[in-house]
Amino acid sequence: MDGQGRSQLQMAETGPRALESLLGFWAEAGVDTAFTDEPVDRLAERIRPPPPVQAAPKAAAAPAGPDVSGAIAEARRLAAEANDLPALAAAIAAFDGCGLKFEGARQAVFSRGVDDAPVMVIGEAPGADEDAHGQPFVGRAGKLLDKMLGAAGLTDRVFITNTVFWRPSGNRNPTVQEQLVCAPFVERAIALVQPKFLLLAGGASAKAMLQRPEGILSLRGRWFDWTSSDGATTLPALPTLHPAFLLRQPAAKKRAWADLLMLGERLDRPERPVD
Ligand code: URA
């Protein structure tokens, strides 16, 4: 290509229509807010180092990626100190060990629902609406979740949270490291709420909570045991399809509905007396 052709191409690539199209592309991908005036190259940026901690216990798993064992130890320490849900919410809000907090999230998003609910719903990560309101599942997907829980007789019987507590930029899935760093808080929430069952909404939640490699279409509708990191607590956990997926694939709603009915049936099944 000659010099003139190249400069015409550059003009076409940077003209107002190209900019409009690029902005449209980012908006489609969920990037709808500018947090700073200057662009930040996240690929060149290293994850914020975790605060120094004493003698970090070994992380349960060591996936490829940044070493987050110090942040996990700090999260465990803070979570263990929280004796009730408001204290846990405050500990999460004050925690600086998860890189998501510094990607532009407005606030920590912890939970909503009933404090001693028999079912804990664990989603993937807050989105834009949750980031704005400070509560999980309050956007379109949350409204669908509420409708389905209501239809299955589970309204007022759920406590709702996520595997991570800050909105990932661009609505990407949280990384394994981000989920590992937040896991001690999720586990503490389970210890404080003491649900009978976990409902894991979406593949990123099911994989993180159950440490299983299969996709959600294979995991959903089957009961698994979730076990706490100290091995002391085991709970039945049911993976199901994420409501955001159901908004895109309405034909899959019947499978999620079958999962909720299965959960409701088990919840209301009379407990067998202990001999
Ligand atoms: N999707 C999730 O997984 N969690 C939310 O809180 C909202 C949308």
Image (cartoon, helix red, strand yellow):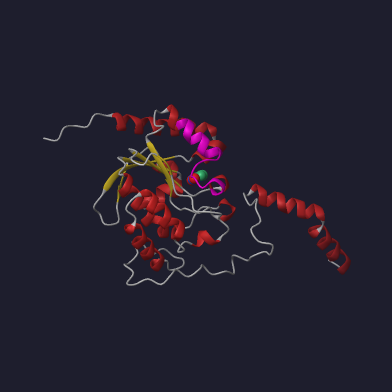
Based on the picture, tell me whether residue 10 belongs to the magenta stretch. Answer: no
Q: Nearer the viewer, residue 200 or 117?
A: 117
Q: How many marks?
A: 0
* Quadrant (top left, top right, bottom left, bottom right) of the C terminus: top left
Residue at 52% from the left image edge and 31% from the top image edge: 251
Q: Position of residue 69 (x, y in %)?
A: 38, 67
In the shown orientation, is residue 125 left or right of residue 214?
Answer: right
Q: Vertically, is 250 above or below 185? A: above
Residue at 79% from the left image edge and 59% from the top image edge: 13
In the shown orientation, is residue 95 left or right of residue 80?
Answer: right
In the shown orientation, is residue 259 left or right of residue 141?
Answer: left
Q: Nearer the viewer, residue 116 or 150?
A: 116
Q: Position of residue 204 (x, y in %)?
A: 45, 49
Q: Position of residue 18 (x, y in %)?
A: 78, 54
Q: Which residues are drawn in magenta?
A: 131-148
Q: Nearer the viewer, residue 218 or 54?
A: 54
Can residue 6 be spotted in the picture?
Answer: yes
Based on the picture, tell me whether residue 139 belongs to the magenta stretch. Answer: yes
Give the farthest residue toward the right: 4
